[in-house]
Amino acid sequence: MTTSQFNRDVCVIGGAGHVGLPLAMKLADAGLRTLIFDINPQAVTTIRQGRMPFAEEGGELLLEKVLRSGRLEIESTPEKLADCRHLILVVGTPVDEHLNPSLSTINRAIAGCRPWLRDGQILILRSTVFPGTSHHLQNRLFDEGLDVRVANCPERVTQGHALVELGKYPQIISAFDAQTLAAVRRLFFCFVSEFVEMTPIEAELSKLMTNSWRYIQFAIVNQFYMIATRHGLDFDRILHGCRHHYGRMADAPGPGFAAGPCLVKDTMQLAAFSQNQFVLGHSAMLINEGLPSHLIELCKRDMDLSQRTAGILGMAFKADSDDPRDSLSYKLRKLLTFEAREVLCCDPHVKDSSLVPIEQVLEQADVIFVGVPHSAYRDLPIPAGKKVLDVWNCVRRDADMSAVAREMTGSGEPAVAPVTR
């Protein structure tokens, strides 16, 4: 089948999710005939109705626009894949119970699409994958007698801000031959002007290293936080001293839960690729995953939790997100159930029937943990007599602490601003 025989430009497989849907809308808005294929019927119905199934800056307006244009189609069955020149695969790539990479989701996705794959198509891996996955898939397709070329073009955006960031950063592109590389460059050129060419395994590794780098950065500052607070010191003041008008520390993040569906998973994939010699990665996991337990230990210094009600503000994995996947707030809740008389949790964005209104948490909790620095919590007045564990420095401070912050910064701004993951 020649390029001219394809009726559609691109299909985003798994395209109803946080990575795929913004990409599909961006491609359709650039004039490409775009198909979304996703096996989640609820998400497919929601998108067809012109509603975003998750929070995405600018998503509702663009979705309405591209649906009205007729350039975006959404299907829950794969038959129309045969009409698409480019297939962009964005299914998740988990690690298993041993923290080793798993190809199960990719293999299932390819198997489900196999009857509709055609010679002349290009399969682009967009999700983070274990190094060597692109080569594995290319050989598998060739062995099955299919002339479908594989490319790896990893996504590089922040969840919830993908539409803003898709054209902001250079696009990494890679393929096993020059013709395929040129084709994926032409595809992404509709919204990206700068490209970085790599081999597929280099592209795979660069994505893992990028996420691991961020995860380790969070681990370093979380370790600093643990060191300071174990000695009863005010870490906000210390971090302010480290960063204030000092360029070598200016980009240091603040402490907080480093979680979500990417960072720890990709760090563990890199560890597996290094034959478990990635000592920094494993140490980062121990630190970041240990932060909820550390906060509980700090609390137990001052009170007997077994006789108290604990509250958690925020259950998403990052600020102003509605995504609770792999959120450490849920780990905190689990640990608190062994320590506290009762645990109450709330979140203005996450849909979870176990959550309660924020007013109930503020009224009934004896100790309050800030799980996520949502905008709704900024400067939130906490009732008198409540103990607060706020690693993010998010909620309103006591009057004397605010005065110290103003004196240190020369303004009304907090000495250490909350950092969004």
Image (cartoon, helix red, strand yellow):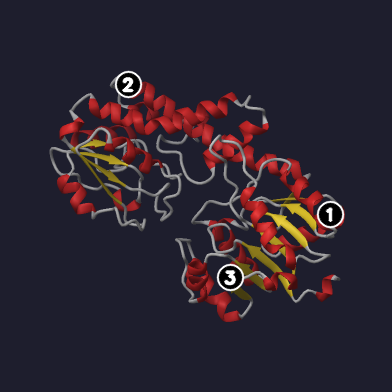
Identify the residue at image location x=57%, y=45%: 94
Quarter holding the N terminus is bottom right
Q: Is residue 379 left or right of residue 43?
A: left
The kind of residue on which mark 1 rests is: Phe
Q: Tag 3 or tag 1, which sits nearer the N-term? A: 3
Image spot of residue 107 (x, y percent): 67, 52
**Quick one: which residue is furthest to the left in this view?**
385
Decide if residue 101 is in sight here. Answer: yes
The secondary element bearing badge 2 is classed as: helix
Q: Is residue 317 left or right of residue 356?
A: right
Q: CA distance from mark 2 to mark 1?
A: 57 Å
The residue pinned by badge 1 equals: 142
The residue pinned by badge 3 equals: 76
Q: Is residue 368 above or below residue 126?
A: above
- How many residues crowd around disc 3 within 10 Å: few (fewer than 14), some, or many (20 or more)? some
The secondary element bearing badge 1 is classed as: helix
Identify the residue at image location x=45%, y=61%: 55
Q: Is residue 368 above or below residue 164?
A: above
The residue pinned by badge 2 equals: 230
Q: Is residue 298 left or right of residue 19?
A: left
- Residue closest to the eye, 171 or 416: 171
Identify the residue at image location x=51%, y=56%: 161
